[in-house]
Image (tube, rainbow, N blue to C red):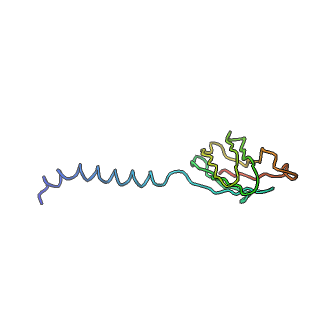
Amino acid sequence: MTRRDLLRLLPGAAVAAFGIASVGLAASGPRVIRLSARRFAYTPSQLRLKLGEPVIIEAKTEDVFMGLNIPDFRVRADLVPGKAARLAFTPDKAGTFTFVCDVFCGDGHESMSGTLVVA
């Protein structure tokens, strides 16, 4: 193979390599974090996120209708028994924040909260 043949192949190889890299990047997507809610606790009760990293919190409850509210990031969802709710956001500030159940779910509701740590 001559040098001229190699130069003709180079643009096609670059396009193919870029396509493979793009597929790899697209496949990674946002980090999915699973969160379980039940009277009167979230599991896990602490979520650790990276500043600027897109995430999806996939929250489920199996017992009663609840809410999940992360007021510092202006995201919330209703949690319906047996269905997954997905909250997508990108943490844009570092610190420790509280997430809460914002739908009355019975005695003990007022203590239902968790911590979001963004670093």
Quarter of the figure with residue 41? bottom right
When the figure is inspected, residue 44 is found, relative to residue 70, above or below; the finding is below
The x and y percentages for residue 108 are: 86, 53
- Between 98 and 92, which is closer to the camera in this rendering? 98
Q: In the image, is 113 to the left or to the right of 6? A: right
| Total numbered circles | 0
- Between 59 and 48, which is closer to the camera in this rendering? 59
The x and y percentages for residue 59 are: 66, 53
- Report the residue at 81% width, 52% height from top: 112
- Between 75 and 81, which is closer to the camera in this rendering? 81
The x and y percentages for residue 72 are: 71, 41
Most extreme residue toward the right, as rendered?
A: 107
Image quadrant holding the N terminus, namely bottom left
Q: In the image, is 7 to the left or to the right of 27? A: left
Q: In the image, is 56 to the left or to the right of 105? A: left
- Report the residue at 88% width, 52% height from top: 107
The x and y percentages for residue 74 are: 68, 39
Quarter of the figure with residue 76? top right
